[in-house]
Image (cartoon, helix red, strand yellow):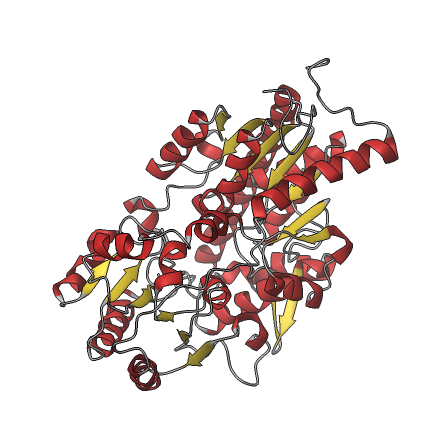
Amino acid sequence: MTGQNEYFGSITLKILVYHSIVHQHREVGPAIDHLAINGMRMTLLLGWRGPSADEAADHYAALGIDVLRVPHELAYDDPNAPSHQAQIAPPEAPDVGSGGPSRWRQGIRRLLGFVIALRSAAKTRRYAEHLLMHTTPDIIIIGTDHSCGRCHNALKRAAQKQGIPCVSIPYSSLLSTAIAERSVFYRLKYGMVAPQLRADHGVTNRIFSHLAPSWTREKGGVRLFRFDPLNTLAARLYGLVDLDPWQNPSHDIDLYLAPTDHAMRLLAESGFPMDKVKLVGMPRLDKVAGKLATVGLRSELLNGLGIPDDASFILWNMEPGWEHGYRSVTEHWSQVKAIAASLRDTRMPVVISLHPLCHHSDYEFIEETPDFVISRNSAIHDLLPFSALVISYLCSTNIIASIFGKKSIIFDPKRYVAEDGESVGDHRVPGSEVVHSLEELANAITNAAAHFHGRDVQPALLSDYRPACHAIQTTIVALMEARRVSTGQFKPTTPDNA
């Protein structure tokens, strides 16, 4: 698509976009839609499998975007497939016994895994190189995958080799190297780290911890790898992992488009080069902010949920503890039922927003409680502006609740956020209250809910909101224009040379 348009004049960039997972599609997709509508020639690569990927492909194809799919063996699993759900339980320590044969078998398994990782890295690198040769993009837009040997790494490497600018648009504000480090050691505390990530796990890991110390981090006398060192070696041999695998986001990208001030602060505190960062906003909020003043919008939303127009409702952001694999089935459902009981006592309508990993059918039993309803057609971004109170967990959407001036009660039973802990600044946002026990949660809910009984909650209109999609467009064009002027190598596609 070429020709005049509001933002780019006669320039038409050829953009390759990589959405590795469904979260990237949902959070960043509106910006991609906007770029396509305003004249950019787009090729979009989807990196996961399943019905949600099929729906995304149909959506982008309808906008005239060329849609490609990562080969099946290189793609991420369908996040809602039963087979995927079965694989996300916390890893258990292998039974290696005390005899030699078990250790030999373990060594052979790791060696075979290394060979498989080598073959996968080689295939992934070839695929990325051929893809760029085929699509000849002027610029690449990727997410912030913290990965090793995957398509994300291969596209970034191929772009660097071919001199193609690489822009990263994240799907979350809670991304930084420090958060990556803290989260791995947090999982270690609760037995959720595979043994092959420990530096003291066998001779091989000990050797790598000395030869490649940047691959490890140490805390409390325990040294960990970010990825299995053999997989990291396989990826390094093909250039598909950073020299420091803990970096998140990678310092090798050309430009990072931060969604919030919170994200900017976390990056600066982690030592990310801030000359590569620009604050643009959250693409998914553009549509929400733009329609908040629409007459009857609140009534339409509430009627669709079966809630009276004049009711104030509590928004329950459901924690996918079991689905993400960090909580057992028993622990998860026990916690869900306890929270539901506390919310029931408020006698306020409760709207439940489920994570993309959650199956609606697993949670439908909660709707047997009067005034509890699962939102099936409205995303949490659409619900937040109209809610009275938010019950949540350690989630990036708490930042969005703060943007809309909502009070969030954040349940943190594992005390990941402690007053004297390093992670306090990661998750504390204006208007939030962090509690650590079910009793504290019940009291906080009761006290907060009492404030809203009989009140008509109106959304903040965000009158000073600056559209993120427009900021992303102008930033990308400015980047390419500056590159063309400074190097003389980039020649944007125009009607004359298309």
In the displayed structure, does residue 179 sit left or right of residue 294? right
Indicate the position of residue 318 as horizontal and vertical percent values. Answer: 33, 63
Is 454 in front, or is 318? Answer: 454
Count of number-bearing discs: 0
Indicate the position of residue 231 as horizontal and vertical percent values. Answer: 58, 47
Q: Residue at x 69, y 68 (%)?
A: 269
Is 164 in front, or is 203? Answer: 164
290 w.r.t. 166: above or below: below
444 w.r.t. 368: above or below: below
In the displayed structure, does residue 116 sit left or right of residue 357? right
Is 432 in front, or is 293? Answer: 293
Quadrant for the N terminus, please.
top right
Quadrant for the C terminus, please.
top right
Quadrant hosting residue 165: top right
Q: Residue at x 44, y 45 (%)?
A: 26
Q: Does residue 234 appear in the picture of this structure? A: no
363 w.r.t. 119: above or below: below
Q: Residue at x 48, y 49 (%)?
A: 284
Quadrant hosting residue 94: bottom left
In the displayed structure, does residue 136 sit left or right of residue 289? right
Indicate the position of residue 306 as horizontal and vertical percent values. Answer: 18, 57
Indicate the position of residue 367 as horizontal and vertical percent values. Answer: 16, 62
In the displayed structure, does residue 391 sit left or right of residue 194? left
**Residue farthest to the front?**
295
Q: Residue at x 46, y 60 (%)?
A: 461
Quadrant hosting residue 17: top right
Q: Does residue 296 appear in the picture of this structure? A: yes
